[in-house]
Amino acid sequence: MKLHSTVVVIPTFNEAENLELLLPQLLPLEFDILIVDDSSQDGTVAVAERIDAGTGRISILSRPSKMGLGSAYIQGFHQSLEAGYETLIQMDADGSHRVADLQQMIAVATNSPGQDLFIGARWIPGGKVENWSKHRELLSRGANRYSKLALGTNVNDMTAGFRIYRAALLRKMNLDGISSQGYSFQIEMTREALRVGANVQEVPITFIERTIGKSKMSSEIVVEAMVKVTQWGISRVIKRSR
């Protein structure tokens, strides 16, 4: 049920404890919530339904198995576009994205009608991370610098997953052509947005490492991103040389 013009899309896989904290903070804001759940076994869906309490503010898109972050967002975007939402927000369920930062991003988006994509960025002035090891920080900074250089963009935080999209931009993008599942999904979405001429604005945020549950980060996710970015970079060089 569509009650507002904006929806926040939140993929979940066993995030019941985190949703207990996040959803009550989101409900006072004027947008709907779509939970895209990959068959959680910890009561994630039940938590969302209880907090919604029949208001229709929180919708559940239940998927039959753990199908990946990228496909969860794509499916959630498709459903939201079909419902007629004008603005789509993507946000993590694990507490790493602060509602206070979301409110600031929304304010920036409201005052910037000419922009198509707003990225909650860590690696710009005013942005930061909390509770990360130095190794992980260096890995993220390095991956973003490599992606920026390989793809020839001005976006500093290519891997950021805290975003606001205009529906008009998503409709121009080839969403079904996005194949990445790990954090390279964010890079690929940025690449596709720029391909169709998006105006991108980065907004500084504070990213907080999750304190409840287990991180989904793995070596496979890192390898997927590095391989794909390298391939895209090579493709870009070949096109420019023709």
Image (cartoon, helix red, strand yellow):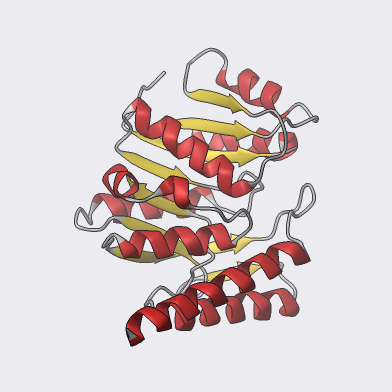
Task: Give left or right: position of 60 versus 213.
Answer: left
Inspect this view and state whether residue 153 appears.
yes
Q: In which quadrant is the N terminus drawn?
A: top left
Q: Vertically, is 96 above or below 6?
A: below
Q: Which of the 4 quarters of the picture holds residue 182?
A: bottom right
Q: Position of residue 220 (x, y in %)?
A: 74, 63
**In the orientation shown, which residue stands out farthest toward the front?**
242
Please tell me which residue is depicted at 41% across the width and 82% down the height of the picture. 238
How many marks can you see?
0
Q: Nearer the viewer, residue 39 or 238?
A: 238
Measured as percent of width and height from the top left, residue 108 is found at 31, 56
Image coordinates for residue 205, horizontal then vertical, percent: 49, 63
Can residue 205 be seen? no
Position of residue 241 measured from the top left corner of the image (x, y, whole percent): 35, 87
Is 4 displayed left or right of 184 in the figure?
A: left
Question: Residue furthest toward the left?
Answer: 114
Above or below, 136 relative to 9:
below
Residue at 41% across, 65% down: 191
Q: Which residue is found at the position 55% from the left and 53% from the top?
A: 179
From the viewer's side, name the closer residue of 215 and 233.
Answer: 233
- Say which quadrant the C terminus sits in: bottom left
| Location of residue 153 by image quarter | bottom left
